[in-house]
Amino acid sequence: MKLGIIKERKTPPDRRVALSPEQIIIAMTRFKDLEIIVESCNNRIYPDQAYKDLAIQVSNDLKDCDIIVGLKEIPVDFLLPDKTYVIFSHTIKKQIHNRELLKACIRENITLMDHETFVNQQNKRIIGFGRYAGIVGAYNTLRAFGIKYELFNLATPQSLKTKDDLIIRLKKQFFPPIKIVVTGTSNVAKGIMEVLDGAKIKKVPYDKFLKSKYDCPVYTQIDPEQYYKRKDGTQGSKQDFYANADLYESDFERFSQVADILITGHFFQEGSPVILTKEMLNSAKNQIKVIGDVSCDVDHGPIEATLRTSSIDQPFYGYHPKLNQEVDLEHPAAITIMAIDNLPCALPQDSSRDFGEVFIDKILPAFFNDDKDAILSNATITKQGELTSKFSHLSDYAKGE
């Protein structure tokens, strides 16, 4: 099997890559019938020469490859017909801007597999960059707090090299006895907590978080059972919420009245209730002054203060809750918002290595064991010129309807 690693062509440029030079050697050693070719790229975190130094083939032509692996979406003009592509296609939520990509995959007889849909036998997601989104997002949020209150001005994450560099800098700062609330239990949330723990910020149970005062910075982590409640007043549960989201409403105001910072790590399903409303933020009892929206759902998302995405180079903007509009960060009523949708790009080397390890251990074997656990088939969106049955619900979207 011949596998190609593509040059990332999406704008803004992404320096991450699916496999590092060392990981390619590991993969080809482990799977004797595997050959890997790397498409030449001038802005990748690992330069072409790093691959050539290990005798890995670098080329401008991947036409001989059976499988082509990348990260971001591929411009339609660069798709090769009759190939298998393994990428983050960002089509499964019917994203309008990627409709043409899905249509082209059907038209060009491309087998499209999506990293986002690789799941194990327990239906849990296998691979992604969630952990590093959480890591960089937590660091940037604490950085925003320091800037807002003129306590410290941390280096930008993209100017540093590793996760450890971020944590070392946080450890050196003084934090007043602030309260931080983290939503979710995903890998994103785990990455957030990894940084907060590394910064020696104490984790406390949510009920004590709501009622107690502390003489040191603390955080609590909550899931839907804490930030939603049933409208009818009966006892809810996480399972019931996922099955009947329309019967729930936000119960987050009790947190917004005591927390100084919100960092989001939840998964938001379309049709779920808003978590943090503009009315909560406009309340005289609101205490939240910095929001790190790592989950970053903008259009009709759960955090109404997230008006738009920000960027790695321009990570923060101000939100005026009474006006419900963006204002200057220096505005006295501004809540600082961090809503970057490509956070792992700030640490391209660490996040690439983390991704590559999982790809080699969990995904690549499926190409050589007849997909015995259905990892590949479950992640396949298009095949033989049509949508697979699992993704047939995308039919209207693919037709442009």
Image: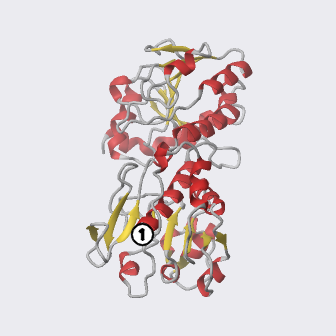
Mark 1 highlights which residue? 150
Q: Is residue 374 visible?
A: no
Query: Along the line of sight, which residue is nearer the eye, 273 or 176?
Result: 176
Q: Residue at x 43, y 30 (%)?
A: 8
Tell me the residue at 44%/69% (across/down).
Answer: 290
In this view, 190 is above or below 384? below
Q: Amino acid at mark 1?
A: Glu
Residue 150, given in percent of the width and then of the height, sits at 42, 69
Horizontal and vertical percent for residue 315?
A: 38, 55
Residue 115 to residue 80: above or below: below
Q: How is the image coloured?
A: secondary structure
Which quarter of the rendering shows the N terminus?
A: top right
Image quadrant where one finds the C terminus? top left
Task: Work out whether 341 lies above or below 74.
Answer: below
Q: Can residue 261 be seen in the rendering of this structure? A: yes
* 150 displayed left or right of 183: left
Count neighbours of disc 1 (C-alpha within 10 A) and say few if under 14, some if 14 to 19, many if 20 or more. few
Find residue 205 and report its horizontal and vertical position in percent: 67, 76
Q: Secondary structure at mark 1?
A: loop
Q: Residue at x 32, y 69 (%)?
A: 319
Say which residue appears at 55% left-offset and 45% top-offset: 129
- Position of 231 compared to 79: left or right? right
Identify which residue, 287 or 394, lies in the foreground. Answer: 287
